[in-house]
Image: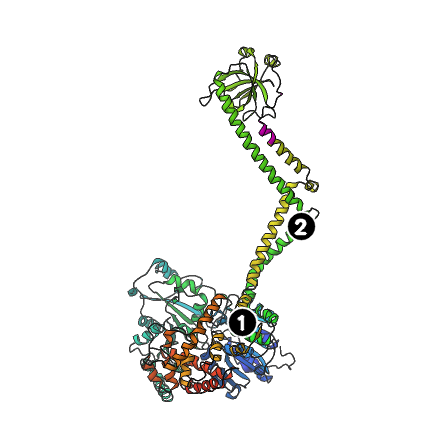
Amino acid sequence: MSADLNPVTLDINNLFPFELDQFQKDAIAAIDAEKSVVVSVPTGSGKTLVGEYAIYRALARKRRVLYTTPLKALSNQKLRDFQELFGEENVGLLTGDMSVNRDSPILVMTTEIFRNMLYGTPIGQIGTSLEDVEAVVLDECHYMNDSQRGTVWEESIIYCPKNIQLIALSATIANAEELTDWISQIHGQTTLIKSSYRPIPLNFYFSTIQGLFPLLNEAQTAISTRLKAKRTPGRQRGRISREDCPSISLVISQMQEKQMLPAIYFIFSRRGCDRAVQDSGSLRLVNNEEARQLKVRIRDFLAANPSAGREGQVEPLHRGIAAHHAGILPAWKGFVEELFQDGLVKLIFATETLAAGINMPARTTVISAISKRVDVGHRMLTASEFLQMAGRAGRRGMDERGYVVTLQTPFEGAKDSAKLALSDPNPLVSQFTPSYGMVLNLLQTHDINETHDLLEQSFSQYLSMLKLKPQQREITGLTSELAKVDVELAPINIKFFSQYQKLKEQQQEERRLLRVLEKQALDSRIKAVTATLPGMPEGSVLYLKGKHIHVATPVPAILVTKIPGSGKFPYLVCLGTNNCWYVVNSADVMGIGDDFFSEATELTPPSELEPHLGATWKGDKTTRKILAKVPPYTENLEEPEVVAQRQRLNAVSQQLENHPLQEFGKPGKLIKRHKRRLDLKEEIHKLQGKYRANQSHHWQEFINLVEVLREFNALDNFTPTALGESSAAIRGENELWLGLAFISGDLDNLDPHHLAATVAALISEPPRSDSWTNYLPPENAIATLEKLRPLRRQLIQIQLRHNVPLPVWLENEFIELIGLVEQWALGAEWEALGDNSSFDDGDLVRLLRRTLDLLSQIPHVPHLSSELKRNAKRSAQLMERFPVQDV
């Protein structure tokens, strides 16, 4: 990185005449070693100094630095700070609607602008906008977590030329090592500078109606025993009454008593912030001298910006109290920020957006609730959200400690607050999402293989691969085991396994059939024997083989006597020709012989023979003599079906014994190994399928977008057409929709004020249900939008078919409001717009700025008509005035 330049040694002590923290020294050393850096330290720790050093270093080497921020307001603040630090001639600003001194060595911009600059150049190369750039500072890099805009940071890091140093400044994140490793892999050697040290330590307090108490114990490791002992109600214990919760005025008086002002009081709703200012009543937080300075500053500001002061905002400001949220005019918010930084405003009621990087440190931050409303109800704050707001407390060089106050609420208690205060920050997660603009811009400068490789470089892909490592190891292990089994079974013809297995299955089936036939024969014999049993005399010859006599061939035996059995049929006491006494029943009799031996009447069963089924006892010499007269078993008493089935079974068994598989070892073991081989292959196939699906997630999203673009002829194979080139030049939520609308010709002949109203409808989501305006929408704009509706329906249908979830705005509810935009373009006064609509100042400015931004893009979009470009340029000129344009 810039290794061809002569090294420059800067006098750190002269640049920063105070003791640097260790992380700052380490970061400076890494920058001097030509490495990129990731600085992850607590909010308010002084990480901006690292970016400032990179600027000093670049200026000394006659090079340039791009300083990017997530917010236009933060960019404006950095512009002012750097102009004071480095001189106005050395600092420029580039935002969506403003360009100031854009060729300066220090150029401040939003991160989106930087990403867009990279889009205009073949990725990895230096375009004219990046000439002589030595470093890019990505301030507030933890914005990668932002669900809507986080992808911009990833794209900026991926597309940035590798010879430019990246200096990523982030609040504390849990996975800073992963972020650093990812940047090292895709951009170049990167050093992590990580610290948990805060130069101004934080003390956490908890406010109740009884007082303001320390939230944590002295070691800052657990909830204070005092609060724990009070068993302060928490969410899990249900709601408590609002009367038992401290009011805003009580919290302020508690802070005044402990000299905790100035403070930022976070409330998660605009209305809540405005109400809090009103509820402050006549509370005066400034002394006489401060009140005098405020009077002069407010008078001068309103003289320069007469439409900026709103009712309910000016009077409390004289008392040192203000609100700060997205509904307030940006110029007024900027003025409040300056007054707060100068120590003239003592209390700001703000939404959490104030915690997003704007340099407004306070002695105390108050977090009014630790849960907030989201689209699907309420949720607890994340640890990072909590820490980001808490980090605003403590002014370096002014306070020995910063204070963070949380409140008892109807749903949340001290235990909930302590849990958040002691939590570690959350990890960064990737928000990388391909868009039509990304697809078209990449394909204009890269072939499809290069594009695929770029998508594979996302932080999302990196994190996915980390998660897939255990799966990858499992695949590797299974593949290794499969290789061993394959080697082991290699000499065996694979057909042998299926042949043997089929024979084995056939053997099992023949055995099953044999059991069925044997059972049927047994039932038949039992029935026959049972029928003859009552009249069967002692001395009859029986052939025994069955459940209680386990022999290969039937044993001829003499029935000696009958004894009572367990049921209605008696047990048979027999003497077998093997000179053994048996106690059996009819189920053990295979047949009845024709012979009869009267000598049986002379026999007496031995006393040792127990009278239960299956009992046996050895005979003596006397019994042996009698048995000698009994003829041996010669005929087959089994039924022919049984005999035939047994022969079939024996034949199959013989085939198994003679099967070629027997030559390689025990077939059962070999079959088991072969089954394991098949199972391994199936398991590996499934795992590889899941692995590939995770691996190619973004690529599939990319291809889905490609398919939609092809259906509208914005791509010819993978080459952008005229429509594709037009859409690629547009920045919006759905670049294809805007490209289709602009190139359709339907907007070409609209008057500039009608064009502004029409453009607003193409980019605006549905408004709040209670939104209204007294201005009627212009008929020409409505007629034009009606012409575009079939195109919109077609795009929505095709997107659904290809699983593309991008919005296609053209909402009826908003069309009713576009008269506001027309009136502004026609020259209406700002106060008139506010009086004739329900919009907050901040929302109205944002609507008009977004419209102005898109109108400003149109003249630079290729393949559009000259009429549309001319009207768009004129329309932008009509809209470009205070407070829409306030710099």
What segment is highlighted magenta in the picture? 632-644
SS at circle 2? helix
Q: Relative to residue 286, is residue 488 depicted above or below?
A: above
Say which mark, if any, is on residue 710.
Answer: 1
Q: Secondary structure at mark 1?
A: helix
Residue 240, x across and y down, in percent: 31, 61
Q: Is residue 176 visible?
A: no
User: Depth-wise, is mark 1 or mark 2 nearer the camera?
Assistant: 1
- The x, y position of residue 547, in whole percent, is 54, 27
Q: Is residue 142 above or below residue 670?
A: below
Count of marks placed on residues: 2
Magenta highlight on residue 643 = yes
Amino acid identity at mark 1: Arg
- What is the distance, in whole Å, between disc 1 and disc 2 at their CAs? 46 Å
In which quarter of the view is residue 448 placed?
A: bottom right
* Residue at mark 2: 486
Q: Residues within 10 Å of mark 2 (few under 14, many from 20)?
A: some
Name the quarter where the C terminus is drawn. Answer: bottom left
Q: Quadrant of residue 774?
A: bottom left
Q: Is residue 498 above or below residue 557?
A: below
